[in-house]
Image (cartoon, rainbow, N blue to C red):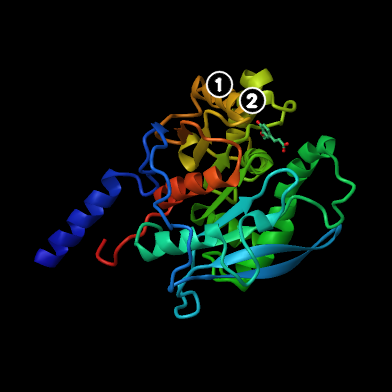
Amino acid sequence: MKRLATTLAAIAALTATSLFAIELPGRYDVTEKLPAGYDRPIEKHGRVEEIAYATPGGEKNAFVYLPYGYDEGDAPYPFFYLMHGGGEDQTCYFVKDGPSPLSNILDRLIDEGKLAPIIVVAPSFYPKERDSVGFAELGALTRNFPEELTRDLMPVVEKKYRSFAGDASDALLKATRDKRGFGGFSMGAETTWNVFLQKQDYFRYFVPISGDSWIIETRGGQTASDKTAEKLAESIAATGHTPDDFAICAITGNQDIAFEPMNGLIEAMTKRDEFRVGENLFYGLMADGKHWHGDVRIYLYTVLPKIWPARSEAE
Ligand code: FER
């Protein structure tokens, strides 16, 4: 009897707060920097592999971070897709077969019981032949990437590595959207907004870092804030979803070149019913934060454990 009562109490506790609640204030200042040495390697580390996948424009590669212990069990893992910025590639996050500051941070967060073990996939929006791509074409590339993501990359990477989507059929990828997020920095944030616009069927969590949406025009978060927010809002019902179905964890710094565009967009979003600060929209701001990967790592350190907190067996 006691056991049943305990179980019922646990269920009541679970249902009282949403299963998907994000433990962040709606608006918050990012004050915690990385602890000293946090980006150095530790013994219980994961590993980074490279995966090839076919696209209409030729074969491309993505890096895959597998957390410590991946080979031991048979449990599935949540997936987080992480996009680089303009002029960069996936090596800004990970190094093939080796440690990087970000992989070391993920290792530590997982080892310290702050972050649940997750698989992180770092692809690129650039085509195989990227030499000819100029700044003017970036918006088109990031608008096209969401289709490549769900059609070409996800079925390959989520079948090869243990995701919740089993054989990674399109139906199962959609059915497991709660176990998946997409984020990115700068033009990777722009990609993230495009994934939100097009692919809410496959993703619940969105982490745009220091970048606005260029769906109306370049830097439209600043120059066409309301129209850009309207487009984003319209995509919710247009993709068959509701404001309860997603969480956007936007984050940047007040000295970032993307601050004005991103801030303009977030303020315009908060004026709309579809976006609810503290429920489906979270906005972190770091004093003195600039447009560089040192700060990006602080933002990921801040946000990822709130989306995928480690849970003990007892919970
Ligand atoms: C932004 C400001 C700058 C932004 C992207 C950039 C997507 C990127 C500039 C570059 O790659 O040179 O608001 O949002």
Seen as rendered, the residue at the extreme bottom is 72
- Where does residue 190 sit, x and y in percent of width and height? 66, 38
Kindly tell me whether residue 224 is visible in this rendering.
Answer: no
The residue carrying pointer 1 sits among few (fewer than 14), some (14 to 19) or many (20 or more) residues within 10 Å by Cα, namely many
**Number of disc labels:** 2
How crowded pointer 2 is (Cα within 10 Å; few <14, some 14-19, many 20+) is rated as: many
Compared across the picture, whether 281 is left or right of 53 comes to left
Residue tagged by mark 2?
Answer: 221
Q: Residue furthest left?
A: 2
Return the residue found at the far front.
Answer: 36
Q: CA distance from mark 2 to mark 1?
A: 8 Å
Where is residue 68 drawn, in percent x and y? 46, 72
Question: Along the horizontal axis of the image, is 210 left or right of 15?
Answer: right
In which quadrant is the N terminus drawn?
Answer: bottom left
Q: Quadrant of the image for the C terminus?
A: bottom left
Assess mark 2: CB under 8 A from ligand 1? yes
Q: Amino acid at mark 1?
A: Ala
> Quick check: 57 above or below 293?
below
Residue at the (49%, 35%) spot, across then down: 243
- Earlier in the chain: of badge 2 and badge 1, it is 2
Mark sitting on residue 168: none
Answer whether labels 2 and 1 touch (C-beta < 8 Å). Answer: yes
Which residue is pictured at 72% across the width and 57% down the height? Answer: 151
Could you tell me if residue 193 is visible in this image?
yes
Q: Please determine whether, in this image, residue 106 is positioned above or below residue 69.
A: above
Q: Which mark is residue 268?
A: 1
Residue toward you, 244 or 184: 184
| Residue shown at 44% from the left, 29% from the top | 276
64 vs 41, nearest the viewer: 41
Kind of element beneath mark 2: helix
Amino acid, disc 2: Gly
- Is residue 238 rendered to the left or right of residue 297? right
